[in-house]
Amino acid sequence: MDATALAAAPARPRTRVSRRWRAAVVGHLYLAPAIVLTGLFVYWPLVASTTLSFYDWNLVSPTWAAVGWQNYRELIASRAFWTSLVNTGKAAAALTVLTVAVPLLLALAVQRVGPRWRDLYRVVLFSPTVISMAIACAVWLWIFHPLYGVLNTALRVVGLPGPAWLSSSDSAIWAIVLVTVWKTFGFNFVLYIAGLLAIPREMYEAARVDGASERQLVWHVTLPLLAPTTLFVFLSTFILGPQNLFIPTQILTQGGPNEASNNVGYLVYQLGFEYFRIGYASAAATLIFLVFLLLTALQFYLAERRIHYGR
Amino acid sequence: MRLRQGIVLLVAVLGLARSVGAAEPVTIEYWHINSPTFGGPAAKELVQLFEARHPDIKVVEKFQPGVYTGLMQQLQVSLAARRPPAVAQIGYNLTAYAAGQFPHVLLDKYRKSDPAFFKGIPDNIMALGVLGGTLHGIPFGVSTPVMYYNADLFKAAGLNPDQPPQTWDDLQRQGAIIKQKTGKLAVYLQQPNDEWIDQTLIWGNGGRPLSEDGKRVGWDAPEAVEAMQMWQDMVNKSKIAANLTWEEGLQAFLSGHVAMCLTTIGRQEHMRRNASGFQVRAVPVPRFGSKPLATATGGNVLMIFASDPAQEKAAWEWIKFVLSPEGATIWTKGTGYLPPRAELANDPRYLKPFFDEAPLMKAALQTFPYARPWVSFPGPRGLEITKILIKARDEVLEGKRPAEPILKEAAQQANALLPK
């Protein structure tokens, strides 16, 4: 009797558990391809590169020489590393201002011009995004030409002396930033347009009924409800923006003159594939990864506290 | 009975397979930097001709983008995977690194076994493949810097285009006139991501990019400092020289905004075709006063990376062929590189007709006897040393500090990286 009761009692929970189990297994199976690939191509290289950062290796030599913290010490003492880091900071700040704020203003303006113009502006402003970066850089090379480029010719017309954009250490990094902004801002602009269209009309109507002025509508309705889009644009610009610097740097300046337009991504490439110091390059990559990890964590922390999701 | 027949058949088939295996040609890979517009067709033509002569060898030619640095990157990866090409072109500026870091075949043994091959290649050219007294590669592409000039701008400035500058003093004097009369800049010295012209200036003023024992760089020596200071002054003081990136500078010359341009003879065809509305001519680069001409030599050596003896043998046959009078003729016509065998230029069977029709090439031929190595800095940090010189040049040309302290600091950094 007791035996039957004992056998019967756990029978029901076991079915529930096994059903939950099965659901979990199926879920994991669906996730497996993504997890395996991410593990293989993101996390394993991350571990491998961190390991490599404690060795001296040139890709060819059959042995890796363990050097302890030497790569990190050398990096921290090197001017190239700090210049690249500062440049990346400058570029990230400029990109954030120019590709978060400018597209927002443009999207707000385009919102007001009526549907036909809106479509035209959307196409015009988005088109740089679909042009290949390498080709765009080739075009910018001629725009920047100090002797007869369009940019300096225009500056001379208004009486300003144009710099030698790419060969002066004062302007080279800004030239790279300019190209990157031109190339990426259209994408953010379209995101903002989509964000604006998603704001329910009733919100504006209700605000108008309450007697809100146009400026108040923007300030108290549009901007708060656009915050999730702004957060996304801000994060993606700050984290991905510096990665967009690589191609223009490679094509326009190779990090020169004298490191003036170098950035951390390009530096890692130089150390690894121009000097073939894989361990040293890995140390740079690891340090940079930590810096970005910290910044991203900080951003998420701040964002969690400040964003309203229209609730 | 059946069993015996079967065994006989099996043995016959295996024997056949073996003999087929023995007759199979050796396949070697040949890596080069010859893009479709810079010698690519010549590389293919060489392979076709070679395979017709050597049915037992198959050559797979592979173009590597990114010029010599790009090829090095791919080579490094292929060596890591233990699948290197049998033969590859290594830029002169990278030979010390490749010779020091990569497993490869030393070639002195062929001097004994193939003395005929080495005849006709001048010593100063063969020296480009020698490091520390050992032959690591055979000089294949040879290019010299020359000075292209815009004959029409010379005329517009009231100067005689038949008497272009021969010394740097001449150039600065005539350059000032060009600037004053036409408002154009006088000269652009190439500034790509290498230090070929920088080394040319150092050699030209009687200095050495690297001491003979390879223990110190020579950038802080008075000759080097003086040469680089002159360049700085032309950019920042007299303002007759352009400080532009490589693409910008080349385009400025071709569009008639700069009167003279120092760059490789390898560009002669490009210059001739793209000079917009003016006559382009070429002369050797200017000398420093009465000092003899001396220029760094561009181009590449062929190095053998094959580890299998059959492959190595095939690789050596290939090298001999591409440097034979016939092979070198195809190569020179296709690329504008000078043939390591200088006498071919005067031989009507080979390159004389080509040189007769390419007047700009004469400037390179005149420079040929004065060709010095484009020094490739030794040791595992050699590639960084090159970059230190490039960065120093950048800073010199910006003109915020005089050349001397910049070069002193750069030399100090470089010396610390040279093998002791």
Image: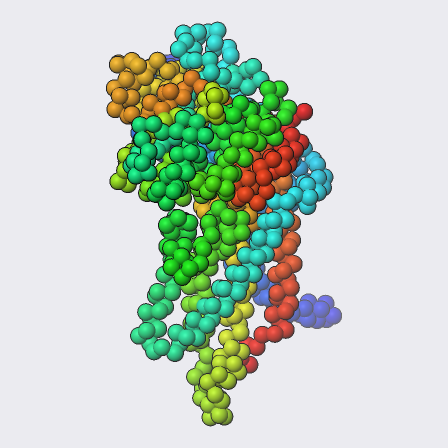
Looking at this view, is A65 or B398 the one in front? B398
Q: From the top left corner, tell me how far across and down residue B48 is, in percent.
A: 30, 23
Looking at this view, is B84 or B110 the one in front? B110
Residue drawn at x 55%, y 81% is: A311
A34 vs A281: above or below: below
Q: From the top left corner, tell me how far across and down residue B380 is, in percent.
A: 61, 30
Q: Is residue B308 left or right of residue B343?
A: right
Q: Is residue B368 left or right of residue A242?
A: left
Q: From the top left corner, tell me how far across and down residue B53 is, in percent.
A: 31, 15
B321 vs A263: above or below: above
Q: In the rendered image, is residue B4 in sight?
A: no
Give the quadrant of residue B240.
Answer: top left
Q: In the rendered image, is residue B176 in sight?
A: yes
B29 vs A237: above or below: above
Residue drawn at x 32%, y 69% is: A120
Residue drawn at x 38%, y 20% is: B366
B414 vs B58: above or below: below
Give the quadrant of residue A280.
Answer: top right
| Quadrant of the image containing the C terminus of chain B | top right
Looking at this view, is A255 or B8 the one in front? A255
Give the quadrant of residue A281.
Answer: top right
Residue drawn at x 45%, y 47% is: A252
Q: From the top left corner, tell me how far across and down residue A261 is, in percent.
A: 53, 49
